[in-house]
Amino acid sequence: MVSTPRLAALGDGELVARTREGDRDAFGTLVERYMRSAYAVALSVTGRHEDAQDAAQESFLVALERLEECRSPERFAGWLMTIVRNRARNLVRREVLRDTDQLPETARSRSPTPERDLETHELRGRLDEALGGLSEVQRQIVLLHDLEGWKHREIADRLDLPSGTVRSHLHFARKALRSALSALRPRERGEAAEQVKP
Amino acid sequence: MTEPIDPATRELLALLDPETGDPGYWPRFHRWVVTSAGPELARRRRTAALTVADVMLSWWRTLVPAALATAVLAAAMLLRDGRARPAPVAYVDVDEMLTVGVEAPEMPAFEIADPDGGIVLVNEFF
């Protein structure tokens, strides 16, 4: 990745201004800063890795083309997440329209490489199922907060939601996830945790 | 106050990170986006490097040929119209229409006024 410490220290407003002039490194820094969040938001809408990846990647290109429409460059993240959500929803609509070629349910929510372990696969399936029981906004909030580490204030600001709503959605989403996953045996959870460590 | 991240939930959610099952996923994602953005970034660099003179020149390049073409077209249309123009129409007054070709005496000639204060007489009648 191309981001330098000097660029990484800059705010979104400055990076957007430089990207408008075609600065490749500034754009690369924005991508690096928000690619995981964009993917998480897209995944919360599509529920499928491939679609989430497509939506997140295309959203960065669309954002670059429409960068002049970003009226508050310092709020680039919120503007980008709106693009991601819209593109992800469009993808889902298209998927529904061409539903005849749907993949079998067992193959839908897999990570890009084959699961290395059956138990991890099962755990992932349970997790997808649990997330599927949440609303779209709850999935977004729990993924951005608990996976990407965004703060309540950042989520509220970037998703254009009241801070109290973010807190209550997060509380409800966590409770629902715990409840759905509580049936998992401690051994499974322990092994899964071992596997995700770097 | 920020609610702490729930470690148990985070461990589970980490399974959704593509990097978990595919090391090097995020650098590849990043490279794909930045490479795909290359043409648009290059276009923006070109636009940012444009000076006022460049802008004027780009206008001149478009404007002068367009003006020339318009002038040639206008001239051609004028010439064509001139050749096809019909004979001019002669407009005649009503009284002129009534008297044209009719033999009639000329307007009466008046006697020259007598400088000594004599009476002027008309010597012809209609």
Image: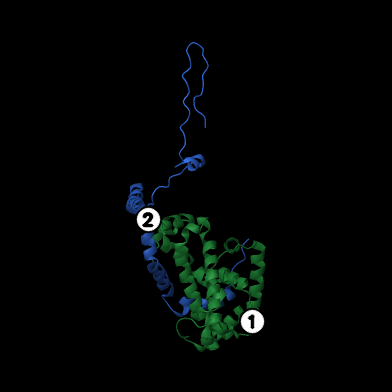
Give the number of the disc on residue A195.
none
Decide: marks 1, 2 in contact (CB < 8 A)? no
Nearer-the-camera pick, B82 or A65: B82
As displayed, is residue A8 above or below residue B32? above
Residue A28: percent from left, percent from top? 41, 64
The quarter in which the N terminus of chain A is drawn is bottom left
Q: Is residue A182 left or right of residue A86?
A: right
As displayed, is residue B48 above or below residue A121? above
| Residue to which mark 2 is pinned | B47
Tell which subunit mark 2 falls on.
B
Question: Badge 2: few (under 14), some or many (20 or more) residues near its Cα, within 10 Å?
Answer: some
Residue B117: percent from left, percent from top? 51, 12
As displayed, is residue B54 above or below residue A86? above
Q: Are marks 1 and 2 on the same chain?
A: no
As helix, strand or loop, the secondary structure at mark 2 comes to helix
As displayed, is residue A68 above or below residue A37? above
Nearer-the-camera pick, A102 or B74: B74
Q: Is residue A142 visible in this depiction of the protein?
A: yes
Nearer-the-camera pick, B66 or A16: B66
Q: Is residue A46 left or right of residue B68?
A: right
Question: Badge 1: few (under 14), some or many (20 or more) residues near its Cα, within 10 Å?
Answer: some
Judge depth for marks 1 and 2 and give the one in front.
2
| Residue to which mark 1 is pinned | A180
Q: CA distance from mark 1 to mark 2?
A: 54 Å
Which residue is painted at 55% across and 62% down in the image? Answer: A78
**Tint applied to chain A in the drawing:** green
Residue B78: percent from left, percent from top? 36, 51
Q: Amino acid at mark 1?
A: Ala
Residue B67: percent from left, percent from top? 35, 51
Q: Residue furthest top?
A: B116
